[in-house]
Amino acid sequence: MKVKALILFAGLLLITLLSGCDDKPEEEKGFAGLADDASSYAQVTLDRHFLFPDDHGPHDDFRIEWWYVTANLKDAEGQSFGVQWTLFRNALPRAKGLQGDGSGWSNRNLWMGHAAVTSRDDHFAAERYARGGVQQAGVTLAPLAAWIDDWSFTSQSANNDPLADMQLQASGPQFNYRLHLKATKPLVLQGTQGFSQKSEQGQASYYYSQPFFQADGSIEIDGKTYQVSGPAWLDREWSSQPLTDNQTGWDWFSLHLGDGTEVMLYRMRQRDGEPYLTGTWINADGSTEQLAAKDIELVPEDTTDVEGRDIPTRWSVKIPSKAVDITVEALNPQAWMNLQIPYWEGPVTLNGSHEGVGYLEMTGY
């Protein structure tokens, strides 16, 4: 929701392109159909115990899932850049009596990839689509590898933690990047031991992150190559119905504070009533504290006209119990993901009580 992100491609276009079905699907409820009935899929429950490395792989009984990487980078001259890489899996409803997910073109999984690079002056994004079962996209565990076509997120690790050493690459018509990501601290379970609630009605996802990556490598923008380094963040989520039909979209923050603290914040906007707020305070040693709505103040301070939409690109973020009082501002206010399912996604800078960098995703505007 690091979509990281939560951008689901269960919309009409992808169903038409990849499922081979000519029937018009029912009207979607909530943003991108994330509130549609999910009774035929597995459900998120509070009593689940995570198992690694298995949970790095796909969870085919759930409707939606993603592997989501963002990175805040600088070159030797101090120029700032952002990189995004996302692989989404969406499962079509299982036909009555069908066991498993089918082989070849009968496989029920649809895949989508998003990749982008952002600088102060430019923002370029690209997308890929694939049908499961034909080896065009997927996720394997030995070694850990997530891919769609030639975009990939692949483990190079020789120890028991496949996330300790990863290689990331993607390209589009006006950009490409290849980054090496290393982590020396354990991953983090978001919410209540990985159970991340998204509404007062109980909608939720399973959610973990690796917020302690350090990245280095190269990015190319419009034919010019930059050697870059900086912090990166992986989000992993899966669910079957993470939103209510009253929720119109979300604002998601991943923040790297200058003292080594990491912060994840969610603001789920609703048609009626106040937004649903949740978050996680991640100490520099990897220990966590869950943040409730009463602990968080997220207030848009300024908007930018982006593709005819008023997008909040400067925010006041306060966590009084942690003495956090910062302004979060977009590096490039025009970081619009102008894809089949459009949204805003880009790097941000932090100023005030704490300095730092991060990423912001905004959907449903």
Image (cartoon, grey):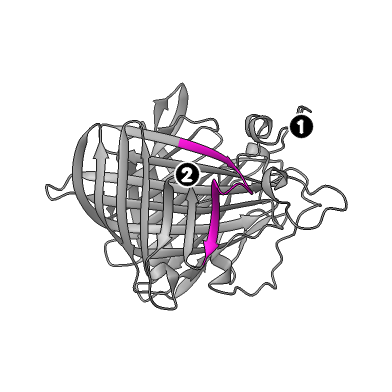
Of the pair 261 and 76, the residue shown nearer to us: 76
Looking at marks 1 and 2 on the same chain, the residue that comes earlier in the sequence is marked by 1
Q: Is residue 335 above or below residue 286?
A: above
Task: Locate residue 152 relative to residue 55 in the image: left or right.
Answer: left
- Taken as a whole, is the magenta stretch helix, strand or loop? strand
Closer to the camera in the image, 173 or 364: 173
Image side of residue 350 versus residue 162, left or right: left
Q: Which residues are magenta?
A: 127-141
The kind of secondary structure element at disc 1 is loop
| Residue 249, x across and y down, in percent | 58, 40
Disc 2 residue type?
Asp
* Residue 149's disc number: 2
Say which element carries label 2.
loop
Task: Using a 10 Å C-alpha cutoff, classify the residue at mark 1 as few (fewer than 14 neighbours), some (14 to 19) or many (20 or more).
Answer: few
Residue 353, visible in the rendered structure: no
Residue 111 seen in this snapshot: yes
Quadrant in which residue 120 is drawn: top left
Q: CA distance from mark 1 to mark 2?
A: 28 Å
Q: Which residue is mark 1?
A: 25
279 displayed left or right of 158: right
What amino acid is labelled 1 in the image? Pro
